[in-house]
Image (cartoon, rainbow, N blue to C red):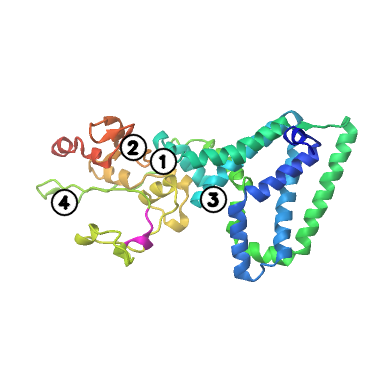
Amino acid sequence: MTIQSFFKPKLTVSVLALVIALYLTVVQNTTFFKAVFAALNKTGHGNLPFGTAIYASLTLLFFLLLSLLASIKPLFKPLLMVILVLAATISFFMDTYGVVIDADMIQNLMQTDVNEAIELFNLKLFLHILFLGVLPAVWVCRTEIQYQPFWPEIMRRLLVIGIAAVLLTGTVFTYYKDFSFVLRNNHSLRYLINPNYPVYSFVKYLKGSTQTQVTQVAGLGADAEENKTWQSRGRKSIVVIVVGETARAENFSLNGYAQATNPRLSKEDIINFPNTHSCGTATAVSLPCMFSNLKQSHYSDNDAKQSENLLDVLAHAGISVLWKDNNSGCKGVCQRVATENTEILNVPGLCAGGECYDEVMLQGMQSYLIS
């Protein structure tokens, strides 16, 4: 093979599909195989033949899926190019940050603001996508696919797909007990297959986002009212609820963590709730959950959207509620109460480049409280 033939190859559809399938398996699924072999070592199934069988099975699975895409002849190469760039982008975030690209993560991505998104872009990401995504996509673009006449091409492709299906079935059947044991005890492994699961999650997200919008929500606490003692207190009372970024409870010194991660809070007379769990790692999930009346074990994003929440109950009771936001929105929690986006205030010394420090939320509070 000459250098020229490598950079501008002539391949059949099946050979090209096999090359890309092998590339996706070996290069773009590092996180998946790390998790697989970690699980194998724990279960005692970590032998070389079974490990090889997993690589072979994933490659054959990719090959069969890509072979189906090949039936869309005009779009085959463009789809391969998109898959390569997409897989490279996904693998960067999975390998670097250890995230799982599921429907909740995609929802969080779609609902984030530009400033938050820009913070994720860096030289390392650019180089990763360039060398592992764009350049392979350019190679595919330069590849000349050699097609035979219609019926011979169909027959040859069906034969190759049949052989691949038989090999995949045979491999899984040969190591069925190993596959069954490992997958039954490690359901999360399928979430790490790149790009299959992220693509599935994106379709799932689109399906959910295109459903009929909720036009009427169920009432909650409509009979709420201030009791007589509270009404006759003779002075104003203010309750401030601060919703911050995600933090692991196990890393709070307030919960017994060895390092002083909460030095200032530890000096205050506060009540700490150590056994608290979020409904998800994405803001789009955790924020509506914490203001709903649903338990974590039974939380549903759809159910939360169809019901009023804590802020509505407070409003029903005649309490003035104001939501001040300095991030990417309230995810539907505040849509029926007064809101203020402090990011647009552009206060000198507190705001720059479209972002503001959280202190900006104190702007105008004095006049609001005495009104």
Residue carrying label 4 = 230
Highlighted range, magenta = 247-252
Q: Quadrant of residue 360?
A: top left
Residue type at the position of mark 3:
Asp
x and y percent of residue 282 in the render? 44, 47
* Callouts 1 and 4 close, C-beta under 8 Å: no
- Marks 3 and 2 sit apart, C-alpha to C-alpha, by 40 Å
Image: 191 above or below 185 = above
The residue mark sitting in front, 4 or 2, is 2
Whichever of labels 3 and 1 marks the residue nearer the N terminus, that label is 3
Q: Residue placed at 27% from the left, 30% from the top? A: 346
The residue mark sitting in front, 3 or 2, is 3
- Marks 3 and 4 sit apart, C-alpha to C-alpha, by 54 Å
- 54 drawn magenta: no
x and y percent of residue 45 in the render? 67, 69
Image: 220 above or below 8 = below
The residue mark sitting in front, 3 or 1, is 3
Residue type at the position of mark 1:
Val
Q: Which mark is residue 336?
A: 2
Neighbor class of circle 3 (other Cα within 10 Å; few <14, some 14-19, many 20+) is: some
- Marks 4 and 2 sit apart, C-alpha to C-alpha, by 24 Å
Q: Which mark is residue 95?
A: 3
- Marks 1 and 4 sit apart, C-alpha to C-alpha, by 29 Å
x and y percent of residue 148 in the render? 87, 32
Residue carrying label 1 = 217
Whichever of labels 4 and 2 marks the residue nearer the N terminus, that label is 4
Residue type at the position of mark 4:
Trp
SS state under label 2: loop
Whichever of labels 1 and 4 marks the residue nearer the N terminus, that label is 1
Neighbor class of circle 2 (other Cα within 10 Å; few <14, some 14-19, many 20+) is: few
Q: Residue placed at 69% from the left, 67% from the top? A: 47
